Amino acid sequence: MYDKKLKKWISDCNTDELRQKCLNPANANDKEVQFLKSSDLLSKIKTKQVAAEAVAGMDKLAKENYPPALYGMGQMFYYGWGVHTDRKKAVELYKKAADKGYEPAKQILAEMKKAKKAKIISAVVSVLAVAGIAAALIFFWPEKAPPVPPASGIIKVNEKTSLSKVEAGSEFANEMSDIILEYDDEEVISGNKSTNRLIVKYDGTSLDLSEFEADLVIANSKNTLIIQFSDKEKADDCYNKLQNAPGVIFVERDEYNVSSNYISEEYCTLEPVESTEPGSDYYSWGVPDMGLDQLSDYVSEYYGDKELVVGVIDFGALVHSENSHRYIEGYNVVTGGKVVPAQHGTHVVGTVLDGADCDNIKVWNLDVFNGYEGTSSLLCYSAIELCIENNVDVINMSLGGPCERMLHEGIKEAYDAGIPVVVAAGNETADIADGLACPADIPQAITVGAYDINHEIADFSNYGAAVDVCAPGVKICSYSHEKDGKLVFLQGTSMASPHIAAMAALLRAIYPDITPTDIKNYIKNSCRTFTNEAAYATNNYGAGAPDATIFIEEK
């Protein structure tokens, strides 16, 4: 089994008697022997590499509900040994093993529950301790005592409710992963069952939630609360009562209703290509169309000394070796582990790298989908908080759903922190003002529609006053998630948005102190209108198509 102190797998075939049993051909079909052999193979991995034979053997036994193998696969997923890290999956396997009466699984589940309670208590004690120390400092040295920022306002909760206060975005993200691990099963993630989770934004210094019997409340320093119930009726009661409660700015349900902005298969061409035109340094036709190739060369030559990071909040991305030096290890916001590569996220990341083709401009992929079709506004908010905490330079969000206040809050916070957020307009051929595409409707974002290679508006692109610019979004070539070096064509405003995110990153390299509003205005003021496209006369598609070459100055 896995030894967390040594950080390696220790073989369960650890006595002469067991080794002899494994060597006897007559025991080849014995499940214990098969388990011991798989465990022994896992112990021979020097690093967290994949050992197909060992994983396959252990997985086969787990699917047959052999308790030690269920527990073993749980450990593998929990610690990322031989497989990707997925703590939600690990807990599911531990529970199956415990249901079969396997004592180590029962023990580890009990320890996890105990650790979670201790974590909450520790957080509360820490806040009280800091407050106490601060009071003492103020008493003895009032002129030198630094102010101690509160974790949040005073939150009163029911005696049966656990309260946790967090400061940093990473702490908030960890709490989110724990909640999802415990409460969100397949039915919840698929949208067939409610999360029983509320998001509350309040004004002032306190909020009384003592009448609501929630399981737990998480509060951050920005007056945002997560309230988790195990019972839908209790969640609905709290939702209804907080709608008009004094000091509550908004309350909304957290559901898995945010999706990637791709378009259906009838519009989407998936054509694998093995190579691009000889001599080309880009894959998307949009890169030279916008002049991003020229601006990238200019930035590389004159402004390549400072590292910039584009945070891509999306599905997980497969790292392609061609640009592996420009990837910052991705983070799975759902599980707290590794990203799960998928086509959409891989393609979007590839276009950012393609459009801002400079070694000093890198990408940090935040996976908010974990392989599922939908994600929640709270997971997206958590990803934005992580981007703010880690000082990324630009954020790209090629996703959207019904209008959610929490997504708006996250983008406003990024905007206030000086980070431009680029979002896809959506693909419903609809007016964004109708509330169909959030966060495309928020004025603090840079909202991007799509045009094709003939400079005509894509027939799927959303429109409206919220659209700032359009960018190439039809038949865009970028990386595939299927294997390193493979490429595919996709289309949608999802594909247009990363072109603008790449341009924003290049502008940040040239003008390091530029504000999000300045970046939006620079991009809009660089636009060419398409005289052959009557739709632009309606002002429904923003300022036009950006021309990045206007920022190139002769040196």
Image (cartoon, grey):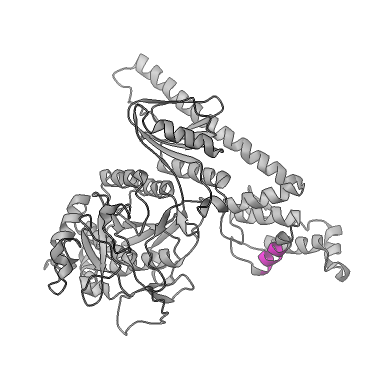
Q: Nearer the viewer, residue 337 or 299?
A: 337
Q: Is residue 387 above or below residue 555?
A: above
Residue 436 is inside the magenta segment: no
Q: Nearer the viewer, residue 327 or 350?
A: 350
Would you say 140 lies left or right of 507 here? Answer: right
Which residue sits at x=32%, y=46%? Answer: 408
Would you say 40 lies left or right of 75 here? Answer: right
Magenta part mainly helix, strand or loop? helix
- Report x, y in % for residue 522: 16, 58
Judge whether residue 527 can be spotted in this image: no
**Rendered image quadrant of residue 329:** bottom left
Judge whether residue 435 can be spotted in this image: yes
- Report x, y in % for residue 12: 76, 56
| View extreme (top): residue | 139
Query: Magenta segment range?
Result: 53-60
Residue 59 is inside the magenta segment: yes
| View extreme (bottom): residue | 278
- Report x, y in % for residue 35: 76, 61
Q: Nearer the viewer, residue 98 or 21?
A: 98
- Report x, y in % for residue 323: 39, 69
Q: Is residue 471 above or below residue 226?
A: below
